[in-house]
Image (cartoon, grey):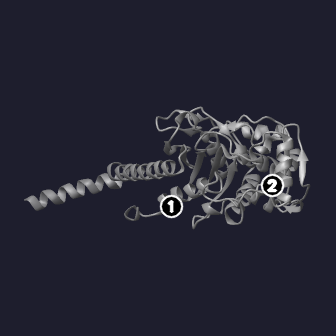
Amino acid sequence: MRRVAARAAAVSLLSLCVLGSACGTEQASDREAQHSASIDAIVRSASDTHGGPVAVLVVDNSTGEITAEAAAGDAARIPLDGRARPAASLAKVAVLAAALEAGVAPSEVLSVPQCIPLPERTACTTNPGEVGLVIAVAYSNDPAFIILTERAGPGAVAAVASRVGMALEPSRALPLGLDTVGMESVAALFAALANDGETLAITRSDGSEAVAAAGRLVSAEAADATRKLLRAVVTIGTGVAADGDDRPYGKTGTAEGRTDAWFAGVSGERTIVVWVGAADSEAAGGAAAEPTPEGALADYEAWLEGESPPEPDESRLIGGGLPAQLFRQVADIFAAPAEDR
C-alpha cells in the first residue's frame, strides 16, 4: 500500500513538473539564490582585499530584469539606485554606436594626432598615426574617439546615450567620460546592443523600472558592428582579463585620477556591470590626476621621455584590472554546473 501511495505521489509531482509550475520554478529559484550568494561572496571578498567599494549588477538580456545585485563598501559612492559616478571610457560605447550609425565603417582607418586640445582637457594617445578602428576601440584611443564624436556629431551621441538613461553633455570631450552614469543605465546600454539595438526596460526584482525602454538605440547593423568591435577589447585590448570561453564583449573604463574603474559587457544571455571605487575616494597622485589640459599634456610628454608610471598591476585601479577580473569570475558562475561552485 505504501508503494502504491509513493508511486502516486511521484506521479503527482511529475505532473506538476511537466506543467512547469512547482519543479521548474523551484529549481530556477534555487539557482538564482545560489548565483546571488556566490556573487555576493565575490564582491565582499574583493572589497575586503581592495579596501574600497565594489559593486556588481547582472541583467537578463531577454527580459531586462536585474537578476543579481551585490555591493560592499562605502554605499554613498556606489553608483546604484540613482547614484552616479564618472563614466570614464564607458562613454566611448555610445560614441562608437552613434558613429557606426552615422556611416563610419568598422574597417575604417583614422588619422590620429598625438594630442587634441579641448577646452575641458587635452586628449593624448601613445598610439598616434594611421589607426584602424578596431585598434582604436581595443585600446581606448582618446583622440580617435574625439574624431568619431565629431563624425557622428556630439548631439547625436548624447541622443543615443539618453535612450538608455545617460545624461551626457553633447561636447567634443564627451568620449573622455567626464559625465556621471549609474550602473543601471550602463546595463541598459549593453542590453540594447545584445538585443540588436532595441532598448528594453531594466526592472528591479519588485517589478519597478530602473531604466525605461525608449525604442531603438541604433540600427541592428550598427549594434552588430559595435558588438564585434567591443569583442576586440577582451581579445587583444584593455580588457583581456575578462575573456573566456563564453566569447564576451565589453568595455573598460578608468576615471581620471583612477578614482573609479569599470568593466561592463555581455556574457551569454547576461549583461554584467562591475564598478570599483578607489580605497580612499581621492584621486591618485601624479600627472594622471591633474584636472587641467596642461597636466594631461605634461603626463603625455613624460611618457615620451620614459617617465611614465610603472606598468599597470593589481595595485593600480584600472578597468582592465580588478573590474575585468570580477566580470570573469561572475560570468564563470553562470557557466559552471552547480556542483562545481
Residue named by callout 2:
141
Q: Give 5 or 138, whichever is nearer the viewer.
A: 138
Looking at the image, which residue is at 72% across and 52% down?
A: 223
Query: Is residue 307 shown left or right of residue 341?
Result: right
Disc nearer the start of the sequence (2/1): 2
Type of residue at label 2? Answer: Asn
Q: Give 12 or 234, whichever is nearer the viewer.
A: 234
Q: Residue 67 carries which label?
A: none
Query: Is residue 157 shown left or right of residue 6?
Result: right
- The residues tagged by marks 2 and 1 sit, at their Cα atoms, a distance apart of 29 Å
Q: In which quarter of the image is the C terminus?
A: bottom left
* Percent position of residue 335, x then y: 49, 62
Residue named by callout 1:
332
Pair 2/1: label in front: 2
Looking at the image, which residue is at 68% across and 45% down?
A: 284
Residue 196: tell me if it is visible: no
